[in-house]
Amino acid sequence: MIETHAHIYSDQFKEDIDEVIDKAKESGVERIYMPNIDSGSIDAMLEMEHLYPGYCIPMIGLHPCSVKADFEKELYIVEDWLSKRDFVAIGEMGTDLYWDKTLFEQQKEAFKIQSDLAVRYEKPIVIHCRESMEETITLLESYRNTSLFGIVHCFSGSEEQARRIIDLGFKLGIGGVATFKNGGLEPVMQNISLHEMVLETDSPYLAPVPYRGKRNEPAYIRQVAQKIADERNIDISEVIEATTDTAMCIFENNK
């Protein structure tokens, strides 16, 4: 399995990171892709890359919740890092109308700047879109005739929204919400091609059932894969094979 979205560098893993990585490997996780938050998380993320080379793999980007009035300074840092070394993706970026709606125009501008960087550097983007699915689709539609591609992380929309996102060249990040009783993702899991999905946990957040409410970790990605398999009445190996192929195509084969 490929863990496409885990903040494994979080302080929540500080005391037992070796055990967390060992558990992930034992559960079948072959790689962990790490989304960045802002300039304050870069050092910790790159330290994880150093400690677990080839296993914990970094992205670079500015999370929408870190978009403040002076967000351009943060984006200069992102652009500077892109000019200095390789990253597999630009993310985590996007929009968020859950916590604070007052800086939405700045979030949209940051979205466009990072999308333009992704086109320039031929990298995928990893999109956060909490309570802003329609707004995000609208932003992506302006890039329809470009090479922009990537993942809509923590997808929680409808089947119709899923198909619109796929039509724009993006895949669906399926995580712990898929296992929630009122998650509402059953139509997506049942009817959307497995090759349009990737697996993720968003560790340490959004732990799947039966761990809901506890610290999430990459090993729990198996619960997500099993939920998709159960909804489709297929073996989990089919889910793992398809989502692994898609994740590798996005992060590695685009180079």
Image (cartoon, helix red, strand yellow):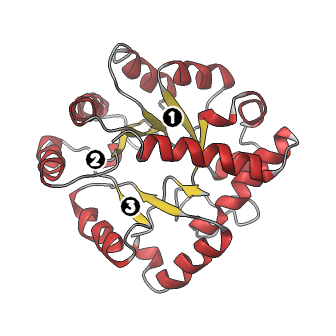
Residue 64 position, x and y percent, is 33, 43
Give the distance between the C-alpha atoms of the residues marked 2 and 3, in whole angstroms.
17 Å
Residue 182, labelled with which disc?
none
| Rendered residue at 74%/59% (across/down) | 209
Circle nearer the viewer, 1 or 3: 3
Residue 217 position, x and y percent, is 57, 68
Type of amino acid under label 1: Glu
**Of label 1 and label 3, which has the lower sequence position?**
3
| Rendered residue at 42%/81% (across/down) | 14
Residue 94 position, x and y percent, is 37, 37
Residue 204 position, x and y percent, is 52, 65
| Rendered residue at 35%/78% (across/down) | 51
Residue 62, labelled with which disc?
2
Mark 2 falls on what kind of element? loop
Residue 131, labelled with which disc?
1
Residue 57, labelled with which disc?
3
Looking at the image, residue 209 sits to the left or right of residue 63; the answer is right
Q: Residues within 10 Å of mark 3 (few under 14, many from 20)?
A: many
Mark 3 falls on what kind of element? strand
Type of amino acid under label 2: Leu
Q: Does residue 31 sit above or below 35 in this rendering?
A: below
Circle nearer the viewer, 2 or 3: 3
Type of amino acid under label 3: Ile
Q: Residues within 10 Å of mark 1 (few under 14, many from 20)?
A: some
